[in-house]
Image (cartoon, grey):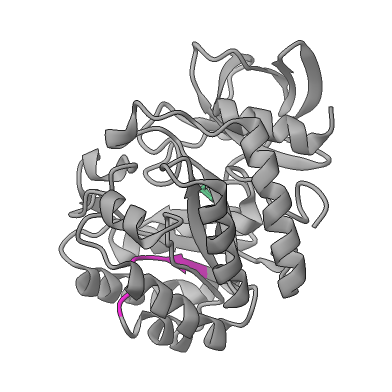
Amino acid sequence: MDWLRLKAQLLAEGTARFTGKAGEPFIARSTAGPGAGSGGSIFFSTGQGRVRLTIDPRSPVEVEHTGGGRAILRCAGLTIEGLIEPVALHCPRQAYITVTSGCIYRCRYCEVPALTAGRKTPEQIEEMVGLVADRIDAISLTSGVLNGVEEEEEYVLAIISRITRFGVPIGVSIFPGESTADRLHDLGVAEVKFNIEAATGELFATMCPGLDWGAVWRALNRSVGLFGRGHVFSNLIIGLGEDDRDVEECITALCNAGVIPIIRPLNPAGELGGYARPTADRLLKIYGIHSRLLRDAGLDPRDALTMCPACTGCDLVPGRDGPL
Ligand code: SF4
């Protein structure tokens, strides 16, 4: 089985039993992204790519750590040798930090609002980055919303001023206001990710009550002029109730704007705990659409420096996991 199909199957599963030798430096415990608040995740990689799996003792997938980061993945009768990668902060090779855990908004697919609200101080974040500075290629920041979108932005801007000294590209993903893109750019941020989340405005309104889909699109369009084509990203979740034509139209609109879509399989969580994860076949079909539209637009996720397109753990990424 080729890597692309294997990864699609693993993403459709989403979990793995972690067995064998102890794995502390290899386990990520996260307060954002798929698996937020869970018992941890591991990053299994082969020479062809990387996948993030949430640790679950009931999973049909097994990753056995045989020592020193070497690992054997067993899935559907297959045995694949690879590595589990050490995590810097949240993922390999990045200090990816959630500034504020907890959120005043109630996006239905998200586990973050259920987490105890907490906020790292700028000093804490500077110290956290300092501790992993010798093993990162990028710093990425994301955040829930503690009090309001504008207040969160101010807080994150103050943090950025303290971490530019590490000299690696900085990526930021927060809910954007009207001048967020300009202010991040002025501070030297390299890349931004503003998430449209759902394939249609109607679905977004249902899934993310109180948030403005139009504000995200305005911020994306503004960002491409500042950060450049291919250095602006947007998560599009698959499995919220959209059909493949909705997905294709949405990917087309993002690519036409110069934005790289991140096609994120739904992790059924929060209020959507009863939803199904998208199947491997659907993910592969959408991969074909995604890669064709990226190619037509002259966009290449391999140019990404930060955040999810540089990590690739949770998504099928054209150019990194298979042909563009
Ligand atoms: S792809 Fe994004 S959300 Fe997933 S582990 Fe990597 S950085 Fe985190």
Q: Residue at x 56, y 53 (%)?
A: 245
Can residue 143 be seen here? The reply is yes
Q: Nearer the viewer, residue 83 or 36?
A: 36
Check the image and report above or below for 5 versus 161: above
In the rendered structure, does residue 79 fall within the stretch colored magenta? no
Q: Nearer the viewer, residue 200 or 255?
A: 200
Task: Give the extent of the magenta segment.
Answer: 171-177
- Numbered label tally: 0
State the quadrant of the N terminus.
top right
Q: Position of residue 202 (x, y in %)?
A: 33, 57
Q: Position of residue 317 (x, y in %)?
A: 68, 51
Q: Residue at x 49, y 12 (%)?
A: 57
Q: Quadrant of residue 51?
A: top right
In the rendered structure, does residue 173 fall within the stretch colored magenta? yes
Q: Nearer the viewer, residue 197 or 97?
A: 197
Can residue 132 be seen here? The reply is no
The answer to whether 239 appears left or right of 84 in the picture is left
The answer to whether 303 appears left or right of 107 in the picture is right
Q: Quadrant of residue 204?
A: bottom left
Q: Residue at x 50, y 37 (%)?
A: 28
Q: Position of residue 49 (x, y in %)?
A: 75, 42
Q: Quadrant of residue 145?
A: bottom left
Check the image and report above or below for 29 versus 179: above
State the quadrant of the C terminus.
bottom right
Q: Nearer the viewer, residue 97 or 223?
A: 223
The answer to whether 101 appears left or right of 48 in the picture is left
Q: Residue at x 40, y 32 (%)?
A: 268
